[in-house]
């Protein structure tokens, strides 16, 4: 039974489909850029959340932003990977969701982003909601029960 069959779409919340913080790769504000690039390349993720030392969400950092930042006129300036910190390059203007927001709110936010961070009322990081998690749930719905013909 998929969540979507079990309950009306409008009653589902972000909490029902989010990936909890303990399963999310992240980097910290004062990590060198090199560390962030290593985490991104090794994990295969295009971007990850940036947290402060108390686990408050500060932004996100992605491979493209890092590579653009170290791109010189004709070559990548690799020294900059150890000179710069995550906080110098991260994106801070990001959407945020609360666990209690509806899944519809989550879907709207995910139109423009492959993942959206979930925080509590005080801004502490709770996890992420991804397009993939929602698409998997929709697929389950399609292949079981009422929609078997699809
Ligand atoms: P997906 O929808 O699973 O392809 O994930 C889309 C994006 O969400 C990835 O490229 C990452 O930027 C981010 N993401 C997904 N899962 C994780 C995770 N466990 N830890 C950190 N970032 C993640």
Image: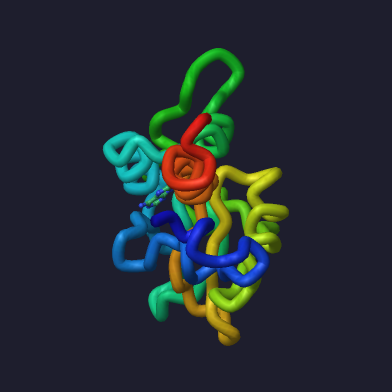
Residue nearest the viewer, comparing 41 with 89? 41
* Image colouring: rainbow
**Is 39 situated left or right of 125 in this image?**
left
Count of labels in the image: 0
What residue appears at the point 45 percent right and 73 percent down from the top-left corner?
Answer: 126
Q: Position of residue 92 (x, y in %)?
A: 64, 59
Q: Is residue 62 visible?
A: no
Residue lying at the far bottom of the rendered structure: 122
What residue appears at the point 54 percent right and 66 percent down from the top-left corner?
Answer: 7
What residue appears at the point 60 percent right and 18 percent down from the top-left corner?
Answer: 73
Residue nearest the viewer, comparing 37 with 72? 37
Q: Is residue 140 visible?
A: yes
Q: Is residue 11 above or below residue 29?
A: below
Q: Position of residue 9 (x, y in %)?
A: 62, 61
What residue appears at the point 68 percent right and 60 percent down from the top-left corner?
Answer: 104
Quarter holding residue 14: bottom right
Residue lying at the far left of the rendered structure: 42
**Is 34 situated left or right of 116 in this image?**
left
Quarter holding residue 68: top right
Q: Is residue 89 above or below residue 52?
A: above
Residue lying at the far top of the rendered structure: 74
Quadrant into which the N terminus falls: bottom left
Q: Position of residue 74 (x, y in %)?
A: 55, 13
Residue nearest the viewer, comparing 112 with 101? 101
Q: Position of residue 133 (x, y in %)?
A: 46, 49
């Amino acid at each position: 039974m998929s969540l979507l069959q079990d309950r009306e779409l409008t009653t589902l919340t972000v909490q029902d489909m989010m990936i909890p913080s303990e399963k999310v790769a992240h980097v910290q504000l004062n990590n060198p850029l090199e560390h962030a690039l290593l985490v991104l390349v090794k994990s295969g993720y295009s971007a990850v959340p940036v947290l402060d030392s108390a686990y408050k969400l500060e932004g996100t950092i992605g491979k493209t932003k890092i590579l653009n930042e170290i791109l010189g006129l004709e070559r990548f300036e690799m020294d900059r990977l150890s000179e710069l910190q995550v906080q110098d390059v991260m994106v801070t203007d990001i959407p945020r969701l609360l666990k209690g927001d509806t899944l519809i709110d989550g879907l709207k936010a995910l139109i423009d982003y492959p993942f959206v961070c979930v925080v509590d009322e005080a801004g502490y990081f709770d996890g992420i909601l991804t397009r993939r998690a929602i698409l998997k749930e929709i697929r389950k719905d399609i292949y079981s029960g009422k929609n078997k013909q699809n």
